[in-house]
Amino acid sequence: MAFKFTAVITKEEKWYVAHCLELEVVSQGKTIEEARKNLQEAVELYLESFGYEDLPQSTGEVVLSPIEIGK
């Protein structure tokens, strides 16, 4: 059975930081692909540790839009 989660990857100085929104799991990498791969591994380890029951999953389209607040 496949599970669907949402990953958000941001650039923070020299690293890309990847967040799984539903599980609050975070990883990083020097490239976007490395961060995504490391996050996938971290999520798999999380699921092995805590189980697969009652998992929150991504339920629809994700729209990200940066906003800027300032004077």
Image: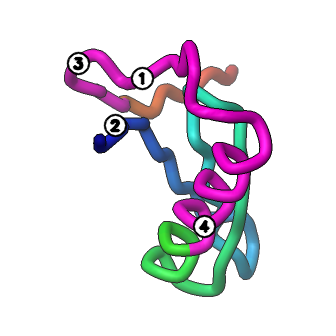
Q: What amino acid is labelled 3 in the image?
A: Gly
- Give the number of marks: 4
Query: Where in the figure is residue 71, as x and y percent of width and height?
Result: 69, 20
- The disc, 3 or 2, on the residue closer to the chain's N-terminal end is 2
Question: In the displayed structure, does residue 58 sit left or right of residue 29?
Answer: left
Q: Residue 41 carries which label?
A: 4
Q: Which mark is residue 60?
A: 3
**Residues at marks 4 and 1, CA–CA distance in whole angstroms:** 17 Å
Vertical position of residue 16 compared to residue 20: above or below: below
Q: Would you name the residue on which mark 2 appears? A: 4
- The disc, 2 or 1, on the residue closer to the chain's N-terminal end is 2
Q: The magenta stretch spans which residues? A: 38-64
Q: Which SS class for mark 4?
A: helix
Q: Out of 46 and 60, give the one closest to the viewer.
A: 46
Q: Are marks 3 and 1 in contact (CB under 8 Å)?
A: no
Residue at 67% across, 23% down:
70
Query: Where in the figure is residue 11, as x and y percent of width and height?
Result: 61, 64
Q: Which SS class for mark 1?
A: loop
The quarter of the rendered structure image containing the N terminus is top left
- The disc, 2 or 4, on the residue closer to the chain's N-terminal end is 2
